[in-house]
Amino acid sequence: MPTFRQKPLEVEAFQLTPDNYIAVEQWPEWLREAEQKHMSEVGAMWRRTSSHCNHPWMINTLEGQHVASMYDYIVQGVEGEIYPCKPHIFELTYEMVEATKDQEVVTENFRKHIKEIFPLEGPESFNAPCFSGG
């Protein structure tokens, strides 16, 4: 059976954190635009009215509605589509192309914070109910 390698491409991403998940003014323009769309539109992102745990946002993607949880990355793909991505998958799949010093500090602080919350190593540490994606 043939194997395939993902083509190198660049995407924009924004991570939802306790400091910014409701501070829409801190979001990139493309994500603010998604928040302004009606929930029935593909590419819309809206706050759940009965939000519980760490699942405050929903995103209407090409594949249907997906939950965006605390610490998830919201990725804008090559055709402008948006979708949530769990932190461990994001770090396995993407690397920063160019970073400012502030971004590097935030990334390092995030890694430390996650290791404090989830001391287990690897993806199994994200199997807690708040990171189940549903």
Image: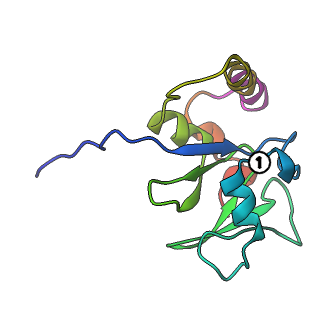
**Residue most extreme to the left:** 1
Looking at the picture, does residue 129 appear above or below residue 58?
above
Left or right: where 102 falls relative to 4: right
**Would residue 59 be counted in the magenta stretch?**
no
Looking at the picture, does residue 92 appear above or below residue 14?
above
Nearest the viewer among 84 and 45 is 45
Residue visible at 10% across and 52% down? 1
Q: Which residues are magenta?
A: 111-120
- Report the residue marked by disc 1: 27
Asked which quadrant contains residue 98, the reply is top right
Where is residue 33? Give x, y as percent: 71, 63
**Residue most extreme to the front:** 29
Q: Main secondary structure of the magenta part?
A: helix
Where is residue 36? Give x, y as percent: 77, 69
Amino acid type at image mark 1: Trp
**Residue most extreme to the bottom:** 40
Residue visible at 50% across and 72% down? 62
Nearest the viewer among 106 and 26 is 26
Colour basis: rainbow
| Secondary element at image label 1 | loop
Where is residue 113? Give x, y as percent: 77, 26
Residue visible at 38% across and 42% down? 9
Left or right: where 119 falls relative to 65: right
On-image quarter of the C terminus: bottom right
Asked which quadrant contains residue 20, the reply is top right
| Label 1 CA crowd tier, 10 Å (few <14, some 14–19, many 20+) | some
Residue visible at 74% across and 25% down? 106
Where is residue 74? Give x, y as percent: 63, 51
Nearest the viewer among 85 and 42 is 42
**Would residue 113 be counted in the magenta stretch?**
yes
